[in-house]
Amino acid sequence: MPEKQRYSKIWNAVFVLLAANLAVWSGVIARNPREFATVNFFDVGQGDSIYIRTVQGNDILIDGGPGDAVLGKLGRDLPYGDRQIEMVIITHPHADHVSGVVEVLRRFTVKKVLLSDVAYSSETYKTLLEILEQKQIPVVRPKLGQRIYLDHHTVMDVLYPVAGDKMQTPEDVNEASTIARLSVGKSHVLFTGDAGKSQETLLTRLGLPLQAQVLKVGHQGSKTSSAPEFLAAVNPDYGVIMVGKNNYGHPHEITLETLGLQQISVLRTDEKGDISFRIYPDRVLLND
């Protein structure tokens, strides 16, 4: 056989093998798309900022922390070139939750904002409302029973505010916090903002679906949150406390003791930095 013809047959065989290999791996990839959501509790100091990437790749931000640290976190975690956030949830208008949101609204395309209609006055909050109006960003008011489909596999159920519950005065701003539960299949994460024991107790008595593998512990672990009956209803494996190194006495020792009695594994951003989970339909994994 001429040498040229022999090499031609070899290359044809190699090509067939490569094509077959590609077909096999293409089938594997098609059968195994990304099947989890990620929830990243950002270490932004004394305040809250939580980034969610849904199963199908939509970007959700809950609060923005007290400054612009959230910008660097998003720059690291968002896919390269992605400048769009599908939804920002503002649990309540205190500066340690909304200051970073102001910077996000200025620099990113935000498609929608979930924001309670609570009476509050501050320069930071005024600026936030002005930007929302200038950019004509749709604002949705949260209410109990609202189900938000973040994608075909990821949903957010609003559990608070409850219609008729007092939440209109500045003294009650923490207790006006939006409470919502993220679900991917049978896995759940409960976000509480700075809600207090009165809100926790109300939700418990209403018999709402509170169970979650991960709980964002209310108000930096203050003694005003984490009622024992509420923790028992949630029954989480992990309790995440978002607190700065200059923590103003947070978390309170009573809260830590209560969490310990419920056998909840406590994770603190002042000790661990960013805390990240993978949320699968049948399990939740802590990213070490």
Image (cartoon, rainbow, N blue to C red):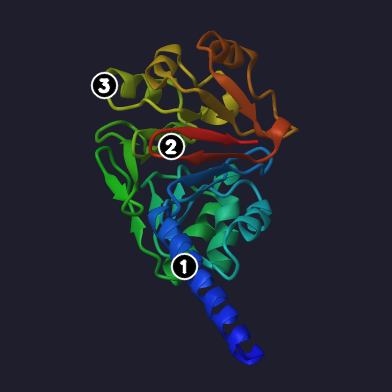
Residue placed at 36% from the left, 52% from the top? 150
- Disc 3 to disc 1, how far (Cα)? 55 Å
How many marks on residues? 3
Which sits in the foreground, 105 or 25?
A: 25
Q: Is residue 203 left or right of residue 257?
A: left
Instruction: Point out the residue furthest to the front here.
Output: 1
Q: Disc 1 marks which amino acid?
A: Ala
Percent position of residue 224, x then y: 52, 20
- Disc 3 to disc 2, how far (Cα)? 19 Å
Percent position of residue 160, x then y: 34, 35
Disc number placed over residue 132 in the picture, else none? none
Q: Earlier in the sequence, mark 3 or mark 1?
A: 1
Instruction: Point out the residue furthest to the top here.
Output: 261
Circle 3 or circle 2, nearest the eye: 3
Percent position of residue 167, x then y: 36, 35
Residue placed at 48% from the left, 29% from the top? 215
Badge 1 is on which residue? 20
Which sits in the foreground, 65 or 54?
A: 54
Q: Quadrant of the N terminus?
A: bottom right
Residue 264 versus residue 5 in the image, above or below: above
Q: Disc 2 marks which amino acid?
A: Ser
Badge 2 is on which residue? 177
Circle 1 SS class: helix
Badge 3 is on which residue? 207
Q: Is residue 118 left or right of residue 273?
A: left
Residue 223 placement: quadrant = top right
Residue placed at 39% from the left, 51% from the top? 114
Circles 1 and 2: CB distance less than 8 Å?
Answer: no
